[in-house]
Image (cartoon, rainbow, N blue to C red):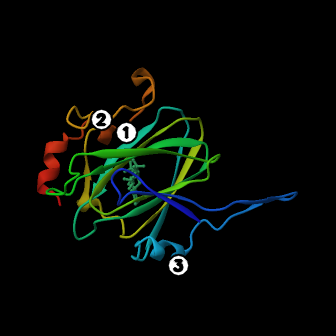
Amino acid sequence: MQFKRLSIPEVIVIAPPKYIDSRGFFSETYNENSMKKMGIDTPFVQDNQSLSRNKGVVRGLHCQISPYIQGKLVRCPKGAIWDVAVDARFGSPTYGKWVAAEISEENWSQIWIPPGFLHGFVTLTENTEVQYKCTSFYNKASERAVIWNCHRLNIPWPINHAEILLSEKDKTAPSFDETKKWF
Ligand SMILES: Cc1cn([C@H]2C[C@H](O)[C@@H](COP(=O)(O)OP(=O)(O)O[C@H]3O[C@@H](C)C(=O)[C@@H](O)[C@H]3O)O2)c(=O)[nH]c1=O
């Protein structure tokens, strides 16, 4: 399993090996010991999956606050996403900075989004499936969101803005300034 820390080093891209043979392939998509070697030592308690039918679906930017703060290990077994992690830990040297990585069926990578980060992605293909493991349970009252195109963050979403599809909730999310109260 290969690991690469991004410019915010707590965010890690993980590339599990894929063993291809005449039948297809085999891959360990999660290995607790490998995670521990990278300092990801919290148990995962919930697995999620979403399907986005269109290219240009933006989900995010989302997080949960304490006591349901979540780390997420995200993979894309079908299609491709451009995945973004924003440091929302007020007081962190990288507060308000973001990193992104393409995660896809083809590159077979995963991305670790630590607790205290906002998470979002845009689908780069139709019928994209995203799966992620979470370190804390879903809790509606703890959910928070920041608007995907917040001027303060200036994230260069790699998709024509006219094509973007959002949930009603994500259309009206507040700006990044709100996060000062969260972590
Ligand atoms: C996130 C979540 C949602 N739900 C429900 C609430 C709602 O009725 C329905 C759809 O939820 P949403 O619209 O929030 O789904 P979505 O916009 O895909 O939200 C997800 O976005 C990505 C970027 C993340 O990082 C996730 O943590 C999560 O926030 O599913 C759960 O039951 N459990 C969960 O863990």
**Disc 2: CA contacts within 10 A as few (<14), some (14-19) or many (>=20):** some
**Disc 3: CA contacts within 10 A as few (<14), some (14-19) or many (>=20):** few
Give the residue type that dot 2 points to: Lys
Q: Nearer the viewer, residue 33 or 76?
A: 33
**Disc 1: CA contacts within 10 A as few (<14), some (14-19) or many (>=20):** few
Mark 2–mark 3 distance (CA, rounded to whole Å): 39 Å
Query: Which residue is drawn at the image coordinates 20% and 51% (left, top)?
Result: 95
Cβ atoms under marks 2 and 1 closer than 8 Å? yes
Give the residue type that dot 3 points to: Asn
Quadrant for the C terminus, please: bottom left
Compared to residue 142, the image places residue 57 above or below, namely: above
Q: Nearer the viewer, mark 2 or mark 3?
A: 3
Helix, strand or loop for disc 1: loop
Left or right: 45 in relation to 68: right
Q: Which residue is mark 2?
A: 171
Q: Which residue is mark 3?
A: 33
Helix, strand or loop for disc 2: helix
Helix, strand or loop for disc 3: helix
Cβ atoms under marks 3 and 1 closer than 8 Å? no
Give the residue type that dot 1 points to: Ser
Q: Which residue is mark 1?
A: 167
Instruction: Point out the tag, 2 or 3, that comes first from the N-terminus.
Output: 3
